[in-house]
Image: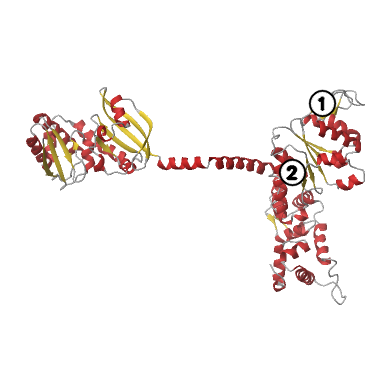
Amino acid sequence: MSCERTAIIRNESGIHARVAAGIVQRAKELAAEYGTRLYLRGERGERFELHSIMPIIALKAQKGAHVSVTAEGGAEREAASEMAAFLEGDLEMHGPAELREVDKLLHENALMQERLQMILEAVQDGICVVDKSGLITYVNPAYLRIVRKTREMVLGQNVFESAPDGNRVGVLRSGVARIGALSHKKNGTTVVANVNPIFVDGEIAGVVSVIKDITEIQRLMERLTQVSARAEYLEQELLRTKKTATAFSNYIGKSGKVVDAIALATKAAASTATVLIRGESGTGKEVIAEGIHYASGRRRGPFIRVNCGAIPPALLESELFGHERGAFTGAVKRKLGKFELANHGTIFLDEVAEMDKNMQVKLLRVLQQKEFDRVGGEETVHVDVRIIAATNRDLEAMMKAGEFREDLYYRLNVIPLLLPPLRERVDDIPLLVEHFIGKISAAQQKPVRGITPDAMEVLMGYRWPGNVRELENVIERVITLMDTPEIRAEDLPTYVRSDIADRAVSGPAGLLTTDAGGAAVLPWADYEKRIIAHAMEHCGTFNAAAKALGITHKTVAAKARKYGLVGEGKS
């Protein structure tokens, strides 16, 4: 049996924490007096038993709010009527009289609980409090959001009935916390819960459950699992790219031929094959060789450089293979050769074409059998060395002339790598100039702001027979001697400026030495206009004209617009 009464809250300040404490105290008194159990329900939601202030505070009932009181067992009518009358009275006035056993500590406790509720409602993790009988007495807004329910749907629910096999019931029965428990809700949400028991005087008084919504994380994990193979590949590719980018970072350039050369060098680094680097003097063969070593699996081993052209033939064998004590005059002790020092690493043989035929035979033995004899020694030395050779000579012509062994050529030329001369990668000159300005000005502690457009145009128009090495030397010379904060065209060496001027006047196929009437030399602008016009007439586009003249597309386009020649060519 039960009896229900409706009450209207008339208290001016509604139901707050201290009033809620008074309501609970009064409910306990009536329950003891009439042998009944009292429940309360707001205008919207399920009822809850009147033995905790938290669900009462959660109602947020203001003056004029309607609440329902239900009494079950014993003298239901009397208990329900008196509780309803109490709720309709002046709760502030009744408080001190009705709270006869509640001292100032209770008031302070009520205020603390009100502050605690404000904190709990701001927390983004879901919090649910369950009493020892299984009734849900408090939930914060985050909990309602995660489980996608309203407060009325949750408060007063008994977990023994709604989730008899759940974590909260398990902790209520065992008193042992459950940490990191996963559960899948009917609405499709996956939550991870930490459920801890609440003990009062050594006895379990309820549990508190803190939940996190991990649905999005779980979906992300599923997606990552689906693409794990690709992720692993991308990770390895990233590591390879980082390693390669670091190894070849000293080789400055972004032009197509440079990109192709570095791509091939990267592939060579992944193998153990012998590499033959070819290119004109000053194109950066040693830089690429070093990059191949440090991008390879031998990067933890030594990288030994040998310039075969700088060592006299009589001493080259001892330098490469070492010698024993007493092998020749001056050999007072054993000396290890470069091949032994490079064991488990890489040896770079620069200017390999300068070796005489006798040394070529001995080098061939090392390539084929990985062994050699020290000068004056009887012991055969075995090594594990990768060979990278380089030359600026025409090895094919040398083979025909009998100056270079054919079998050695094929042993060295397993992976051929050709580096372009600077005149074929003119677009890289600004990058190289910027790099050298920064490097040299820092070394000389001489601030340089940059380079003027005219000076850059001169540098890009020069043929650079010495390639990158010559460019670096020119920049070092200019910075050492200059007195201005910027490199100007007049600061550049005379031979650099005169070379581009001579080639511009002569033009393609000996174009224009004087004016049409054989008169004296015309002003520079007249020659320049006629050169650009002639180039565009024969080449058709700015790109083609720039290549023919040995200058940049940008320069041709600017000059064509300057002299009104845009209609004579296409960009």
The residue at the point 12 percent across, 43 percent down is: 7
Q: Do callouts 2 and 1 mark residues in contact (Cβ within 8 Å)? A: no
In the picture, the disc for residue 381 is 1
In the picture, the disc for residue 288 is 2
Mark 2 to mark 1: distance in Å? 29 Å
Mark 2 burial class by Cα count in 10 Å: few <14, some 14-19, many 20+: many
In the picture, the disc for residue 176 is none
Q: Is residue 401 above or below residue 500?
A: above
Sequence-first tag of 2 and 1: 2
Q: Observer-nearest residue: 107 or 129? A: 129
Indicate the amino acid at tag 2.
Ile
Q: Is residue 542 above or below residue 202?
A: below
Q: In this view, does 528 lie above or below 443?
A: below
Indicate the amino acid at tag 1.
Val
Query: Disc 2 vs disc 1: which is toward the camera?
Result: 1
Q: Can residue 20 be seen in this view?
A: yes
Quadrant where the C terminus sits is bottom right
Q: Observer-nearest residue: 284 or 12? A: 284
Q: Can residue 437 be seen in this view?
A: no
Q: What element carries label 1?
A: strand
Name the side, left or right, on which 147 lies relative to 237.
left
- Quadrant of the rendered image containing residue 29: top left
Name the side, left or right, on which 23 lies relative to 399.
left
Q: Is mark 2 on a helix, strand or loop?
A: helix
